[in-house]
Amino acid sequence: MPKITFVELNGERKECDVACGLSLMEGAIQNGIDGILAICGGSCACSTCHSYIDDAWVEKVGPANDIEDSTLELALERKPSSRLTCQVEVTEALEGLVVHIAQNDS
Amino acid sequence: MNPYVVIGAGQAGMQVCDSLRKSGYDGELILLGEEDSLPYQRPPLSKKFLTGDLDRDRLLFRPAAYFDKIAVDVRLRTQVESIDRAARQIVLGDGSTLAYTKLALTTGTRVRPLNCPGHELDNIYYVRTLTDSEMLLQRLASTERVAVIGGGFIGLEVAAVARELEKQATVIEAQERLMARAVSPVVSDFYAKLHRSRGVDVRCSSAVESIVESKQGLLVNLADGARIESDIVVAGIGVLPNSELAENCGLACNSGIVVDEYAQTSDPHIVAAGDCTMHFNGFLQREIRLESVQNAVDQAKVAAATLCGQPQAYRQVPWFWSDQYDVKLQMAGIGMPFDQYAVRGDLASQAFSVFYFRDNTFVGADSINRPAEHMACRKLLTQGTTLSVAQAQDIDFDLKQLAKAG
Ligand SMILES: Cc1cc2nc3c(=O)[nH]c(=O)nc-3n(C[C@H](O)[C@H](O)[C@H](O)COP(=O)(O)OP(=O)(O)OC[C@H]3O[C@@H](n4cnc5c(N)ncnc54)[C@H](O)[C@@H]3O)c2cc1C
Ligand code: FES
């Protein structure tokens, strides 16, 4: 299981084991990470699972898909490293990934 | 002080608890639910979950540890029998009582049952709860033919899954077009064509007379004399609000628990949110009952704010989605009823939006495989930005820019 580090809004870093095949959003929720709301349950409709991929990882994780790119328009503060975590599938290649949770509660 | 109690452990109930804690309520909090699962997502029940590709654990909104963390005492398999408002206590199924300081009703809806002759036969399925969907999933494995009664969102999503699983599928709709309550004729026609092109036998203006058992399975007899042979029937003919608890204790009800813009019922100690409410919607400026994730979440936040004495009016723009095959329908605002509409994009390429206007005001849009337009519409409606019919149908007019400009 890849280890993923989630950095919560208050700066706290939490290293978690996330099973391959789950989305980053599911990994965060199962591990009790604060700040991911995911009210649409991963249907790419709400943008309340918004996070920033750590700079060192942006290329490896890749850009948002089409639907996601539009949904990100709703995000509070979009950056080039923005992704909706429900749209990122965890694979072995993401071992060591660092994800910064964005402000999702308006 | 007695606890705050939330009745109904669904999406709205969970959100009320979450928002209460975020707003700083730190007293005792109890979430009561009659089902045997922690709060879970219903949307996948008629979509991905039915294909068998999604574990039931993945439907949960939050793991059990989360409720411990925010100190919510979740009591599952607990049915509330009645509310004694004078004594400010509720009576549970086992006869015990529970006193409350404040109460939130998030009891949702239940399916409207078929009432034609034969409605009580075996092999008739509904899709509301996880248990419903698990039973249907299991039965689908040994099913060749599926007759869906009701051409609304849920019925059509089930028909789409049935075709993806290579079953025969028939959709029987009493109205003259699909999803008639929610979308315009343009969108209904698009979906009728889509389902037919994927091999569904779509029958509109078809009332079900009766269902009978035959040697080969079930026979659905239609008013026009047609008979549909099938192994199972899946009925998706709408829902009924769970408002009996409220009615029986004298709260105002009218096809749902009546609440104002602040999710307040006619009792100052009781709020209600989600599918079960007939609410005054600040965005629409009228009373409505909405059945959607958006409404469950946003109205629950309003209800929690009211309980915390920080009232904020419910003004959020409604939105909804439905997945059928690889086609994503996204709805912003409430387009019905409308007096003018504009189509943007190309129906044949399965990527277009239909914009609805009432008294020259843009009131809502249905987007088919057009997420960017859907999002722009949500922004435009939220901001109250003026949009004309001509702008809407001009594909070169930059909607996103208009939405950004505010
Ligand atoms: C198959 C399906 C597909 C859907 N697809 C979509 C979609 O694509 N997009 C979308 O936006 N919405 C969709 N919805 C709608 C969405 O799921 C609902 O709007 C949402 O679940 C409403 O949440 P709620 O908390 O108000 O009600 P519910 O989720 O129904 O929760 C209410 C809970 O209260 C419990 N309860 C009731 N009475 C009592 C009592 N007396 N004592 C104890 N417990 C009680 C019920 O058992 C239930 O668990 C779908 C719904 C279904 C069923
Ligand atoms: S969970 Fe809603 S967009 Fe990711």
Image (cartoon, grey):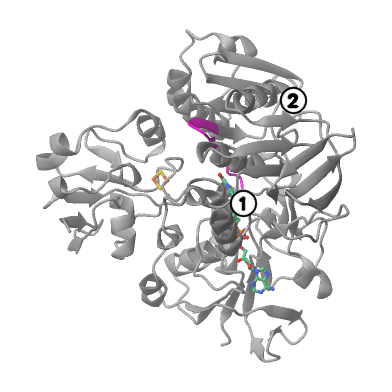
In this rendering, is residue B310 above or below A98?
A: below
Residue B377, image x, y percentages:
53, 28
Question: Which quadrant contains ligand 1?
Answer: bottom right
Residue B263, image x, y percentages:
66, 59
Q: Quadrant of residue B265?
A: bottom right
Residue at 49 percent across and 51 percent down: it is: B49
Residue furthest toward the front? B215
In this rendering, is residue B266 above or below B231?
A: below
Residue B338: assigned label? 2
Q: Quadrant of residue B252?
A: bottom right
Amino acid at the residue labelled 2 = Phe
Amino acid at the residue labelled 1 = Ala
In the picture of the structure, the residue carrying the numbered disc 1 is B313
- Based on the picture, tell me whether residue B15 belongs to the magenta stretch: no
Residue at 64 percent across and 31 percent down: it is: B200
* Range drawn in magenta: B314-329
Question: Could you say which is closer to the camera, residue B76 or residue B104?
Answer: B76
Q: Quadrant of residue B329?
A: top right
Report whether B90 appears left or right of A45.
Answer: right
Could you tell me how far apart the alpha carbons at marks 2 and 1 are, in whole angstroms? 25 Å
Residue B21 visible to an observer of this rendering:
yes
Residue B65, image x, y percentages:
36, 73
